[in-house]
Image: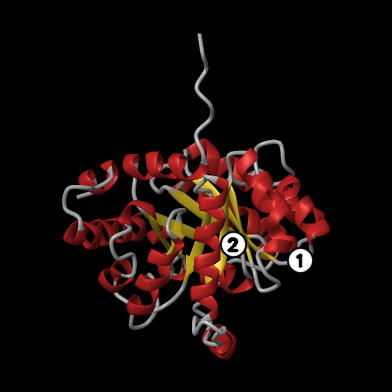
Amino acid sequence: MTTAPPAGFLARWRARAEATSRLAVGMGPSAERLDWWGLPDTLAAARDHALTVADAVADRVSLVKIQTPFFERFGGPGLGLLREVVDRVHEGGALVVLDAKRCDAPDVADTLAGLYLGPDSVLGGDAVTLVPWMGLAPLEPALTEAGRRNCGILLMTRTSNHASDTVQHARDTAGRTVGQALADEAAAWNRAHRTDHLGAVVGARPDEARDLVARTGTGLVSLPGLGRPGRTPENVVAAAGDHLDRAVFPVTSGLLRHGRRHLAASLTGWTLAVRDACDAREPAHRPAEERTAS
């Protein structure tokens, strides 16, 4: 009997989103988030916080985005905790993006998959965020190895950090912004390698985001904004344009700031909000949990 090859990252996310939600949860035990819950800034409190969040969300969302520096700050024990949290999320069924935002030369990029990607790596993630400000070519070893491991890469194509606008709005000789050029490069890389595991993070207002999402061509696109002042679920979802089938919508502060007692109810609220916003744009395509959450 012939065994089917393992599914790639985007296919696995789509299957999970169909079973649960296009919602993602961002997490990481920062001092501020621990304080929201009345916890001290200690490793023990970080473990309590992180595992509580993992247990509450992992069976209800498609993806959990873990901000790695908030674990790394505790040294070796923090990295051990990070792997414990990754494994706990996987037990619940969600995929894990390790939000590390790494950027380096090819010899360093060659080590990144062994650190971040796949069950046999140090940290066990399904995808990792990389910063392509040194160009896409230096990241080639990581991009190629991610595909071999059936994992994903999310390029920081456009960050929502307004302090970076001077850099991100710079234009090349063709008149494209930095974000547009990076989105085009990501699409070209996927085409050249006949894959879709290279995705993007696009933190921009809807009009700019729609253009960038379309330019990426294929690959999962993470669209942050839920829970931020002045952003509604409707305008965050609108940023996906006609590409809802590969768009995931993370929420972090808007979910965690209300404390552990309200975590489950807040998650239900965000699930419904994303469901309704997606349904308004694409009524025929709603993941299972979004149809039953109400």
Tell me if label 2 and label 1 are in contact, CB under 8 Å: no
Give the residue pinned by disc 1. Answer: 104
| In the depicted structure, whether residue 84 falls above or below residue 47 | above
Q: Which mark is residue 257?
A: none
Left or right of 67? Residue 42 is: right
Element on which disc 2 rests? loop
Instruction: Please say whether residue 227 is visible from this viewpoint.
Output: no
What residue is drawn where x is 73% and y is 62%? 138
Q: Amino acid at mark 2?
A: Gly
Q: Amino acid at mark 1?
A: Asp
Instruction: Please say whether residue 176 is visible from this viewpoint.
Output: yes
Q: Which one is nearer the viewer's eye here, 186 or 61?
A: 186
- In the image, residue 284 lies at what x, y percent? 17, 48
Give the residue pinned by disc 2. Answer: 28
Return the residue found at the far bottom. 166
- In the image, residue 164 lies at what x, y percent? 58, 85
What residue is drawn where x is 69% and y is 55%? 140
Q: Which one is nearer the viewer's eye here, 159 or 199?
A: 199
Mark 2 surroundings: few (<14), some (14-19) or many (≥20) residues within 10 A: many
Q: Which one is nearer the viewer's eye here, 267 or 241?
A: 241
The disc, 2 or 1, on the residue closer to the chain's N-terminal end is 2
What residue is drawn where x is 58% and y is 67%? 34
- In the image, residue 188 lies at what x, y percent? 53, 59
